[in-house]
Image (cartoon, rainbow, N blue to C red):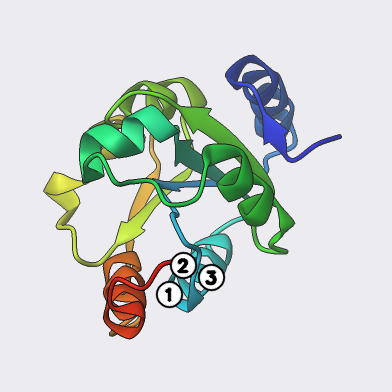
Amino acid sequence: MSSLLTLSELLSLRAKWRAEKKRVVFTNGCFDILHRGHVEYLEQARAHGDLLIVGLNTDDSVRRLKGEGRPIVPQEDRATILAALRCVDYVVYFAEDTPANLIAQIQPDVLVKGADYQIHEIVGHEVVQAGGGEVVRIPLTPGRATRDVIATILERLGGRKK
């Protein structure tokens, strides 16, 4: 079975995992130009449960959130790279600006976001906590962000053509 699932496939599996008492962890993001900070974050997220589901913004969603020049890496490539990580069990796309609908449907046991968010700012925290779940904030790796990678590329290439 592929690690990239549709929402209906994921919900079918979610019912099975609930019956098996598996602790499901959910996080989300754009994950454009995957880097060390992403990998360390995802590894820490996975440590909070039995399965890690990553909600991945579609290209249109990233463009609305980050601007016309983004994403750099297309959604199919981002999904393939994420799914190849040992710590990621499943990837599911979402096209909305936030994963609120996805979180409400999946009902994860643990919702994870970076520590740059306060709990009250984390989309879906109310749903997860109301269902008896936990919201976890993970410290980010300093100096490791997609915007830093993009800035380094632009600085080093300085407008040079391929």
Where residue 25 sits in the image (x, y, percent)? 52, 48
For the residues bearing labels 3 and 2, Cβ distance under 8 angstroms: yes
- Mark 2 burial class by Cα count in 10 Å: few <14, some 14-19, many 20+: many
Where residue 74 sits in the image (x, y, percent)? 52, 42
Whether residue 13 can be seen here = yes
What is the three-letter code of the residue carrying label 3? Val
- Tell me if 93 is positioned left or right of 99 in this view: right
Mark-to-mark CA distance, 3 and 2: 4 Å
Q: Nearer the viewer, residue 103 or 126?
A: 103
Which residue is denoted by mark 1 in the rendering?
37
For the residues bearing labels 1 and 3, Cβ distance under 8 angstroms: yes
Q: Which mark is residue 39?
A: 3
The image quarter in which residue 88 lies = bottom right
What is the three-letter code of the residue carrying label 1? Gly
Where residue 11 sits in the image (x, y, percent)? 62, 20
Mark-to-mark CA distance, 1 and 3: 6 Å
- Tell me if 7 is positioned left or right of 68 in this view: right
For the residues bearing labels 1 and 2, Cβ distance under 8 angstroms: yes
Label 2 secondary element: helix
Query: What residue is drawn where x is 44% and y is 48%?
Result: 27
Query: What residue is drawn where x is 62% and y is 54%?
Result: 82
**Up/down of 1 relative to 39, above or below:** above
